[in-house]
């Protein structure tokens, strides 16, 4: 935090504050004409506070937002009499519905505060100049054998640090660095959506890729085949793991970094999005002493995170929990985690055989990919072990015929399977700018039809009353969510609970998908789209997001 003035409660407001802004509770107040610097304490400004004013605007008008108290932003200015700058602040105050108070500070103080912006342009400029001055390219194989510490202050190292820091500050889950059209493009995936952020010259892009490969202990002279690695950074006292994957492409070499924030910890199942009957079924099934529970969904749908949540609940001293993963994403205290290495013959199948000799109570197999792994998982479930795993199918019901197609005998599947849960991730509405939105009557009619078989009791579990007028929400966009209207993600689910009628159908008639679906519907299974609509009514997400990730009937007209 930066303290630029004493308590401002007695300071007069700017007499030229926008009347329209005032009508919305948004004002611009003017600070003292001068202020002595001894009372100034330098420190790190929160990213969301700093970004209230865009970097280029801050540098152009010589002002920066440094503190927020409720709906009041404090802004340091070199010249609080600058009419053009004040007009910009009035616009921002009106847009966000906040109050802005200005403070005059010395030039050197403002420069120090402005330096807290990402500094990407400066780091990029230094990197380019450095490469132009060097005779030896940075990506030569010789660098791999050098001490990494020698390069900590190099321009390329600083640029990599800036990119990673920007990703962490922006809540990015992945960083993509890829060659495109004679340049390298840097993209960040935030809340499941990729967006371009930076374009690098080819020479700089190659150097950045080499730097990342050095950090991840990869061979920088190997560009013909994919490589995987990881490294760890410390950002403001927080340890961040980065999982690195390289891939040869036509234009060069692409690198993707998965950002794994250990400090975030594992959220509870409720915060992940499990609700209603789905929550009740899964929390009951994971307490069974044996059987297999499957999570299905596409890559990046949060299946492994949900399984980690199950393991976290079961992680007691009296249980021996062993996992087999590819790769290990989060390290859990008290759980034995093992990573497969197919290149040396340590596969899911061979690893599972070894795990069964480790006297486990609970097993987690990262993915069932083939018949051998499926048979071993089923065998483990039938011999008194609780098994968690993932499977790539479009929905929960599709897991049954998929396993039968893999060669699993229907009667064995019926005896071992406890539950199948399908999952997708949708963006969560930003709580700072959420507002009610109007919905056309024809859309509301479609939604009511879609929810016709949802009981009032099930809706009440979502804190939704279907007998009342249906109301939906959206984010209008603010500084907290970078004007996207979304911040964070939440999971949608559908859960197939194995019951005696279902076991009979699977064992006797090989699990006809139509028959399984009919029985599941009679048992009260909530489809993924229904789960999403109920969460939209609760204010967690939007109908548009539900439509984006689910299949079936269209709810919102395209017109």
Image (cartoon, helix red, strand yellow):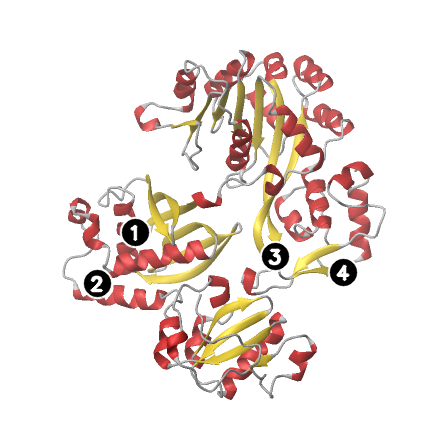
In the rendered view, tell whether residue 496 sits above or below residue 385: below
Which percent across, then down, holds residue 35?
A: 43, 82
Which percent across, then down, holds residue 157?
A: 27, 56
Report which residue position mark 4 lands on: 438
In the rendered view, tell whether residue 328 sits above or below residue 107: above
Q: Quadrant of the N terminus?
A: bottom left
Which percent across, then down, holds residue 31?
A: 51, 82
Front residue of 555/26: it is: 26
Report which residue position mark 3 lands on: 430
Front residue of 491/368: it is: 491
| Dot 4 crowding, Cα within 10 Å, few <14, some 14–19, many 20+ | few
Residue 276 falls left or right of residue 176:
right
Residue 274 falls left or right of residue 371:
right
Residue 209: mark? 1
Element marked by disc 2: helix
Which percent across, then down, holds residue 280?
A: 68, 31
């Amino acid at each position: 935090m930066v303290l630029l003035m004493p308590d401002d409660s007695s300071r007069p407001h700017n007499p030229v504050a926008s009347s329209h802004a005032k009508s919305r509770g948004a004002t611009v107040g003017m600070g003292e004409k001068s202020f002595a610097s001894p009372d100034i304490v330098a420190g790190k400004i929160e990213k969301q506070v700093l970004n209230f004013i865009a970097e280029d605007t801050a540098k152009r008008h010589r002002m920066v937002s440094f503190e927020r108290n409720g709906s009041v932003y404090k802004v340091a200015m070199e010249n609080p009499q600058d009419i053009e700058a004040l007009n910009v602040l009035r616009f921002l105050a009106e847009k966000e519905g906040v109050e802005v108070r200005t403070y005059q500070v010395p030039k050197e103080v403002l420069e120090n505060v402005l330096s807290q912006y990402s500094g990407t342009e400066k780091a990029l400029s230094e990197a380019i100049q450095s490469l132009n001055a060097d005779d030896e390219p940075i990506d030569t194989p010789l660098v791999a054998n050098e001490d990494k510490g020698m390069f900590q202050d190099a321009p390329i190292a600083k640029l990599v640090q800036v990119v990673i820091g920007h990703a962490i500050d922006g809540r990015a889950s992945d960083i993509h660095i890829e060659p495109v059209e004679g340049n390298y493009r840097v993209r960040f995936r935030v809340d499941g959506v990729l967006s371009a952020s930076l374009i690098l010259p080819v020479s700089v892009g190659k150097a950045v890729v080499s730097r990342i490969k050095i950090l991840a202990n990869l061979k920088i002279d190997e560009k013909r085949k994919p490589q995987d690695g990881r490294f760890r950074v410390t950002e403001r006292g927080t340890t961040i793991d980065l999982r690195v994957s390289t891939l040869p492409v036509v234009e060069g070499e692409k690198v993707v970094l998965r950002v794994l924030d250990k400090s975030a910890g594992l959220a509870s199942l409720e915060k992940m999005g499990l609700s209603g009957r789905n929550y009740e079924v899964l929390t009951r099934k994971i307490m069974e002493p044996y059987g297999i529970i499957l999570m299905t969904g596409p890559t990046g749908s949060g299946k492994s995170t949900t399984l980690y949540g199950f393991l976290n609940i079961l992680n007691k001293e009296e249980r021996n929990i062993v996992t087999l993963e590819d790769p290990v994403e989060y390290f859990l205290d008290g759980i034995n985690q093992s990573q497969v290495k197919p290149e040396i013959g340590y596969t899911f199948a061979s690893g599972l055989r070894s795990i069964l000799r480790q006297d486990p109570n609970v097993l987690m197999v990262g993915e069932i990919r083939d018949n051998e792994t499926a048979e071993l998982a089923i065998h483990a479930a039938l011999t008194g072990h609780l098994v968690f795993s993932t499977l790539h199918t479009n929905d929960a019901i599709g897991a049954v015929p998929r396993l039968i197609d893999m060669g699993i005998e229907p009667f064995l599947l019926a005896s071992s399977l406890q539950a199948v849960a399908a999952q997708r991730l949708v963006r969560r509405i930003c709580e700072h700018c959420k507002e009610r939105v109007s919905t056309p009557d024809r859309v509301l009619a479609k939604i009511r039809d879609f929810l016709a078989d949802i009981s009032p009791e099930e809706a009440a579990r979502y804190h939704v009353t279907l007998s009342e007028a249906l109301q939906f929400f959206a984010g209008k966009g603010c500084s907290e969510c970078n004007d996207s209207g979304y911040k964070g993600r939440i999971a949608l689910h559908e859960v197939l609970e194995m019951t005696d009628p279902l076991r009979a159908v699977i064992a006797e008639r090989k699990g006809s998908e139509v028959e399984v679906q009919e029985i599941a519907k009679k048992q009260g299974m909530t489809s993924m789209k229904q789960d999403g609509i109920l969460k939209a009514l609760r204010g967690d997400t939007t109908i548009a997001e539900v439509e984006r990730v689910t299949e079936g009937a269209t709810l919102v007209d395209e017109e």
